[in-house]
Amino acid sequence: MKKRLLFAILGLLIVIAVLAGVKAMQIRAMVEQGKKAVIPPDTVTTFAARAESWETSLSAVGSLTAVQGVTVAAELAAKVVEIAFQPGAKVKAGDMLIRQDTSVEEAQLPGAEAQVALTESVLARDVEMLKDQIISQADYDAAVAARQQAIAQVKTLRATIAKKTIRAPFSGRLGVRQVNLGQTLKEGDPIVTLQTLDPIYVNFALPQQELFRLRTGLPVRVTSDALPGPAINGRITTVNPLVDAETRNVQLQATVANPEEKLRPGMFVNTAVGLPVRKKVTAIPATSVLYAPFGDSVFVVEDDKKGKGGKVLRQQFVRLGERRGDFIAVTDGLKEGETIVSTGVFKLRNGQPVVVDNKLAPEFRLAPKPKNY
């Protein structure tokens, strides 16, 4: 019995050893096959880093302000009897906005005008009577004063009627209506906002260290997250002569054309003041940069000196500068003329063989204009 058990155990060990040997041979064969395997090259698009001369600019966050903006308000207390505008509409200077109740003044006006006519007749007779010394100089002066008082009363009534007919003080676009028909307005009650939107002001500040480089007439580019598309151009029109004592910043104001009225007062925008001095940079497409917490890098395409020819990638860490349009400046780590991968860098690795095919390479521009803008 013991011999049978011993033979059984021995046979089992032999079977296990044979299986282990076969498995080891299979693994060794797979390892050898993996060493001999060649990874197929990936197809990439490339771009040659080039030297460019970029305009020097100073950036700041600005706020938009209307060239003319006001909240139209009632000057006198009265009831609204007519509303002659549509909210959000464009109006011209002098267009009527609302009319208040002027029935009392209109009823008093004919009597006041009649009083003017009467005093003028009396004054005309008194002139002749004064020549003949029928009346005294005091009576004549009283007649002159009575005429002036009557004329003043007519002017007062007409001025009151005019003030109760509220008109647009300048051309612009109206806002939300804040009155209703039949509402009794008090003096100073708001009626509607009125803003001139074209052109529009951009107010921003820059450090006092830049004051010597700033002057009126310098170009300004305005962009906003709320306004996709190309930058809107304008020029500096005012440099505040006073420097803020708390922030040591100088206030500037630029005027920007706004024919489509896309820019609105109160919006925050990004401003860039173009300076006459230009700087030389090494520009590459922004899509060629592999961004990472430990450092930004690009993949340089080089000849494969260790293999059988072809092209391989070398990951090169770079230091980046300003970005403009589709391009970004490289301040360190890359030389002019070096060929780099321009798209799809997130799927590449160092030492990977590649094949260059630029048939479908995108066109990179400093001032891109997508078709949907």
Image: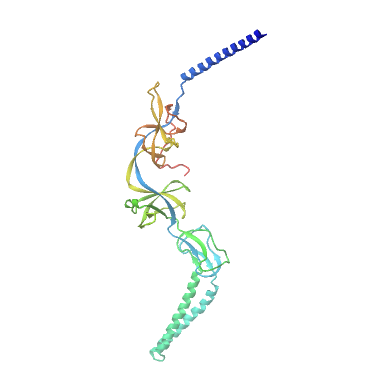
Q: Quick one: 125 or 277, which is closer to the camera?
A: 277
Does residue 136 show up? yes
Q: Quick one: 260 or 252, which is closer to the camera?
A: 252
Kindly indicate the quadrant of the structure image that contains residue 255.
Answer: bottom left
Q: Quick one: 39 or 70, which is closer to the camera?
A: 39
Quadrant including the N terminus: top right
Q: Position of residue 195 (x, y in %)?
A: 46, 58
Kindly indicate the quadrant of the structure image that contains residue 171.
Answer: bottom left
Q: Position of residue 328 (x, y in %)?
A: 40, 39
Residue drawn at (49%, 81%) of the image:
115
Q: Is 3 placed above or below 84 here?
A: above
Q: Is 134 placed above or below 201 here?
A: below
Q: Does 84 sit left or right of 246 as displayed?
A: right
Seen from this angle, which residue lies furthest front? 2
Q: Position of residue 168 (x, y in %)?
A: 47, 63
Q: Does 324 sit left or right of 166 as displayed?
A: left
Q: How is the image coloured?
A: rainbow
Does residue 120 show up? no
Residue drawn at (45%, 80%) of the image:
149
Q: Quick one: 23 or 310, which is closer to the camera?
A: 23
Residue drawn at (32%, 44%) of the image:
278
Seen from this angle, which residue lies furthest right? 1
Q: Position of residue 29 (x, y in %)?
A: 51, 16
